[in-house]
Every structure is written in C-alpha cells, then in structure tokens.
Image (cartoon, rainbow, N blue to C red):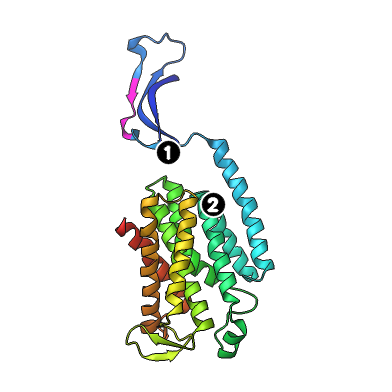
C-alpha cells in the first residue's frame, strides 16, 4: 500500500494546527484510479495543535539540561540547598525550562535568589531565636514543597500543549513560593513581635501562623517581582500580571491560616503547608483568570 495526503495547515503560536487532513490509500502496483482509492477524512484530529519543529524541541531539552546542571551546582555551592535539595531542584528546573521555556526558568532563578538573600538577613538573630534555616541549605522536601505545584503545572502544559492557564498557574505558584519565603524571612529578621492571623493575639516573631507589618509587604513585593519576571519572559500576557500577584497573595494568606490552625497543632508540617499554599495560588489563578 502507498498513501498520499492532502490538507491545509494554519499557523498557531506554538506550532501548526491541522485544519483539514484527508488521507488517500492506494494499493501498490495500481494506478491511482478512483476505484482503487480509499479516502479517509481524519476529522477527529482537526484543530489539534502539532509542533513540527523537532530539532527545536531537542535543542530545548539540551539547553534545559545544561542550565539545570549549572543552576543545581551553583545552588549547592552557595549553600542554598543540600545535596538532595540540589537534585530535587534540578528536576524542577529541567521540567520548568522544557515546559514553560526560558521565562519559567528565569522565574525560578528569581525565586531562589530572593529566598537565598532574605534567608541571610538577620541570620544571627534568627539563630538566637532558634528559627534560622539550616546552614547547609534547604533539603529536598522543602524544595519540592515550594516548587512541586509549579513543576507539575509546567509539565501538564508541555505534555498536552494545553491552555496557557497552566502557565498562569505556574507563575502564581512560583510567586506564592517567593512571597511566603520572603515574608517569613524578613518578618523574622526585622520584627520583634507578630500577631496570629486567627485572633490577632501578640506572639513572638517566627510563630507559625503569625504575621507582622514588614512580612506581608515584603511578600507582596516578592510576588510582584516573580510575576513580572514571568511577564517579561513571555510566560504571561500583561492582562494576567495582576491575577498572578493576587493569587500569590491569597496563597500567602492561606499559608498563615494553615500555620495558625493546623501546623501549630502539629496536624500539618511546614512543608505540607507550603505545598498547599502554592496549590491554592495555582487554583485561584485559573479561577481569577
């Protein structure tokens, strides 16, 4: 058998869309006469997105792999993560680059940079209070708790070539991760007192579920920075910038409530709270869009 196909293609932002495809199957050794031709109209596949740039896709994998190795090694060298944390971060980094492109990878760099810098603000004070991060950096569970939701969203987008709402969810989750970390670290560094978000009772800085004046403001700024990086990197349209920041802020508030209600009672761990708050941000972003 031999086959020939006819059809039309129209361009899309991610590749080409099959508008109409007809396949003609002709038995070998025969002339392509009408009685010998089996016509198959592949209408179930109309309007499905196909990316024919295989070399570009392979190139993205290669670049993603190289950037991932460099980023993981750098993060470990500056003691931002442990060895296991570097491996977990490498997996997230690779998936974010392949799934979301350079914009998602740039946002990851922004999240890491903000976390690394703010963790070192007032570090000696945090050590005295017993709330400082470990000197060797964040471990694998901490990395995945903060980056897991964004990584899954980017992977779903890449695997399905689906709606760009998945990229918005990626941006919101990364922005929330940065907001939560920055608000906690700077609030602990510069605030002597904080207030439980559930009843506004005054408690020491660093108490689970407590908020200070400095912390939330710094968190909003961090969410704005990461979301802006996503915008400049082509991950978001301009109209969704406020959505990404707003969803991140909502996730940050949920983080405080979970900390006050459940983490203080040891019903959830800090990693569980961080994961759930990024999940809330991702879901809220799709709802707000």
Residue furthest to the right in view is: 77
Report the front residue among 28 and 6: 6
Q: Position of residue 272 (x, y in %)?
A: 44, 74
Residue at (54% x, 55% y) in the render: 105
Which residue in the structure is indicated by mark 1? 13
Q: Is residue 253 toward the left or the right of residue 55 in the image?
A: left
Residue that mark 2 sits on: 97
Quadrant showing the N terminus: top left
Quarter holding residue 244 = bottom left
Residue 40 lies in the magenta-colored region: yes
Q: Nearer the viewer, residue 167 or 238?
A: 238
Q: Is residue 53 above or below residue 234?
A: above
* Disc 2 element: helix
**Which residue is rendered at x = 47% and y = 37% of the image?**
51
The quadrant in which residue 274 appears is bottom left
Whether residue 147 appears in this view of the structure is yes
Q: Secondary structure at mark 1?
A: loop
Judge the density around disc 1: few (<14), some (14-19), many (≥20) Cα neighbours within 10 Å: few
Query: What segment is highlighted magenta in the picture?
Result: 39-44
- In which quadrant of the rendered image does the C terminus lie? bottom left
> Camera-side residue: 163 or 196?
196
Residue found 53% across the figure and 64% down from its top: 111
Q: Residues within 10 Å of mark 2 (few under 14, many from 20)?
A: many
Does the magenta portion include 60? no
- Residue at 43% x, 73% y: name it: 217
Q: Could you tell me residue 216's position as x and y percent?
A: 42, 75
């Amino acid at each position: 058998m031999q086959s020939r196909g006819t059809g039309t293609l129209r361009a899309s932002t991610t590749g080409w869309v099959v508008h109409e495809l007809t396949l003609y199957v002709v038995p070998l050794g025969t002339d392509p006469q009408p009685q010998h031709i089996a016509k198959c109209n592949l209408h179930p596949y109309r309007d499905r997105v196909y990316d024919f740039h295989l070399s570009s896709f392979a190139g993205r994998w290669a670049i993603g792999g190289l950037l991932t190795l460099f980023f993981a090694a750098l993060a470990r060298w500056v003691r931002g993560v442990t060895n296991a944390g570097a491996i977990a971060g490498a997996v997230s980094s690779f998936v974010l680059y392949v799934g979301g492109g350079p914009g998602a990878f740039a946002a990851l760099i922004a999240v890491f940079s903000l976390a690394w810098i703010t963790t070192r603000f007032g570090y000696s004070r945090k050590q005295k209070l017993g709330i400082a991060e470990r000197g060797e950096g964040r471990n694998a569970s901490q990395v995945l708790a903060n980056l897991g939701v964004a990584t899954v969203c980017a992977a779903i987008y890449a695997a399905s070539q689906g709606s760009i709402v998945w990229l918005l969810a990626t941006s919101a989750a990364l922005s929330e991760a940065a907001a939560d970390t920055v608000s906690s670290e700077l609030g602990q560094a510069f605030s002597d007192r904080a207030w439980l978000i559930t009843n506004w009772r005054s408690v020491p800085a660093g108490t689970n579920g407590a908020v200070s004046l400095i912390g939330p403001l710094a968190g909003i700024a961090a969410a704005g920075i990461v979301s802006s990086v996503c915008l400049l990197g082509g991950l978001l349209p301009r109209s969704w910038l406020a959505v990404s920041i707003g969803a991140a802020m909502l996730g940050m508030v949920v983080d405080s409530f979970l900390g006050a209600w459940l983490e203080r009672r040891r019903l959830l761990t800090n990693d569980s709270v961080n994961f759930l708050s990024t999940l809330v941000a991702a879901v809220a972003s799709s709802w707000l869009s």
